[in-house]
Image (tube, helix red, strand yellow):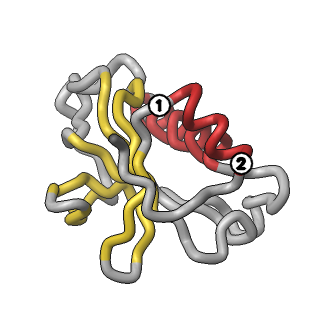
Amino acid sequence: MPRRSFQLAKEDESFLDSAHPAWEAIIEGQSRWLLLENFEAPAGFNHGLVGVALMIDPGYPDTQIDMAYFLPHLARADGKPINALTTQSVDGKTWQRWSRHRESGAWRPGVDNIETHLLYVRSFLEMELKK
């Protein structure tokens, strides 16, 4: 049974139920985390399917979701290095944090949500492979 320690907007939960049915919402310390399984990484990374963790700010959806965390850790299949990576412990596991941020003011409250953030995540992964 997936853990659901906090609620998300109905729109988010409907999207997650259809796209990532095993999603979990956990609270760890003062942080709220959304955990997803089987996120498809673009071809060109060492893993095709990974887990994704998103930190959900208490002010969400007015406050943006920032960055993404992956498990297992991603690497480029061609061996080229990836910048701005570190690790983060979440749910007793060591996730790989990708420090990627939108430009100031790019988050659109009332428009952007978990689904659009995952599209942004996919976009920054694809951009990494073009470097």
Vertical placement of residue 34 versus 31, above or below:
above
In this picture, residue 39 sits left or right of residue 45: right
Q: Name the residue under label 1.
A: 21
Residue 89 pos. (x, y %): 20, 65
Residue drawn at (23%, 54%), measured in percent from left and top?
95
Dot label at residue 1: none
Quarter holding residue 85: bottom left
Within 10 Å of disc 2 (Cα), the crowding (few <14, some 14-19, many 20+) is few
**Residue projecting furthest to the bottom:** 30
In this picture, residue 111 sits left or right of residue 129: right
**Camera-side residue: 130 or 122?**
122
For the residue marked with disc 1, what is the amino acid? Answer: Pro
Residue 78 pos. (x, y %): 22, 24
Q: Name the residue under label 2.
A: 10
Residue drawn at (51%, 42%), measured in percent from left and top?
121
Q: Which of marks 1 and 2 is nearer the N terminus?
A: 2
Do residues under tags 1 and 2 come within 8 Å of each other at their CB atoms?
no
Vertical placement of residue 72 versus 30, above or below:
above
Residue 69 pos. (x, y %): 35, 52
**Camera-side residue: 34 or 3?**
3
Residue drawn at (40%, 35%), measured in percent from left and top?
22
Q: Is label 2 in a helix, a strand or a loop? A: helix
Q: Is label 1 in a helix, a strand or a loop? A: loop
The answer to whether one can see residue 68 in this image is no
Residue 9 pos. (x, y %): 69, 55
